Image (spheres, rainbow, N blue to C red):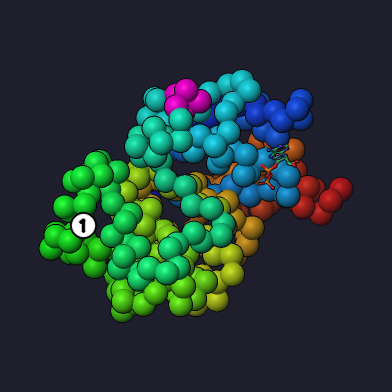
Amino acid sequence: PPSNEQILRVEDLTVSFDGFKAVDGLSLAVERNELRVIIGPNGAGKTTLLDMVCGKTKPSSGRVLFNDADLGRMNEHEIVRAGVGRKFQTPSVYEDLTVLENFEISLPRMHGLLQSLTFRRTAALRERIDAMAADVFLLDQLDRRAGQLSHGQKQWLEIGMLLMQEPELLLLDEPVAGMSPREREQTGDLLRRIASGKSLVVIEHDMDFVKRIAHRVTVLHQGRLLSEGTAAEVQADPRVIDVYLGH
Ligand code: ADP
């Protein structure tokens, strides 16, 4: 459950592309151990917001603070090292490597390259990988090539690889896209479990899934904050209903 401590603060953020404001004067705060879901119609600015948090895009004005560090002044690597992990919609795992090897190369961010190489084959690392693989439902898949996994299993592998780097904040873009109903259910459990010790910001369209996982929901529209609250609260908000019915 969310604590009262804010881990991410977006303050009056504007991101413009050639004068077009993809994010327009947006302010929001995410608490430690909170699972926040971002919804909104296509073009609402959801992806631009996550791109900004992970350093892919820079603010035109305003600030994004992560544990009081100003992310707008940091590059993507510095942001990863500070503890922000981003997963894009399409899983990017190394298809020719086994699941185990994929985990092995996703080493904790505090290890330098040389340390990583010696750490790679230690029993301690293997123990950590086994525990992580079990968490993301892949313990019996460690010797398979990642390319042979189902789409949902690849999503889990990528989430597990991100978690190996021990981020404090995870940014996920439609994590259940292309998953079976059973896989969605398992992913819902997984995300809620992750939120017991980390914060998550998740872009998601499927309202049934949103209701299941979200502590709070932020609704964006035309780059601005339209509504915020529990899933039930935002679903009952006339402004949200208006936008989704296309008035
Ligand atoms: P969402 O993820 O909610 O669908 P996006 O953040 O992808 O919305 O996009 C918000 C708006 O910003 C859209 O109108 C999109 O066309 C525009 N946009 C996003 N990225 C760029 C870019 N790199 N250059 C120009 N326009 C962009």
- Where is residue 58, by image quadrant? top right
Give the residue displayed 74% in from the left and 38% down from the top. Answer: 222
Q: Is residue 109 left or right of residue 56?
A: left
Is residue 201 visible in the rendered image? The answer is yes
Q: Mark 1 points at which residue?
A: 120
Give the residue displayed 77% in from the left and 52% down from the top. Answer: 244
Residue 49 falls within the magenta-colored stretch: no
Give the residue displayed 53% in from the left and 53% down from the top. Answer: 88
User: Which residue range is magenta in the image?
Assistant: 70-74
Could you say where residue 121 lies in the image, as x and y percent from the top left?
A: 17, 61
Could you say where residue 139 lies in the image, as x and y percent from the top left?
A: 30, 74
The answer to which of 231 and 50 lies nearer the viewer is 50
Is residue 153 visible in the rendered image? The answer is no
In the image, residue 95 sits, relative to residue 53, either above or below, namely below
Q: Is residue 99 left or right of residue 10?
A: left
The answer to which of 137 and 224 lies nearer the viewer is 137
Could you say where residue 84 lies in the image, as x and y percent from the top left?
A: 41, 41
In the image, residue 18 sits, relative to residue 227, either above or below, namely above
Residue farthest to the top? 61
The answer to which of 206 and 239 lies nearer the viewer is 206
The amino acid pointed to by label 1 is Arg
Give the residue displayed 21% in from the left and 45% down from the top. Answer: 114
Could you say where residue 239 lies in the image, as x and y percent from the top left?
A: 75, 43
Ligand 1: which quarter?
top right
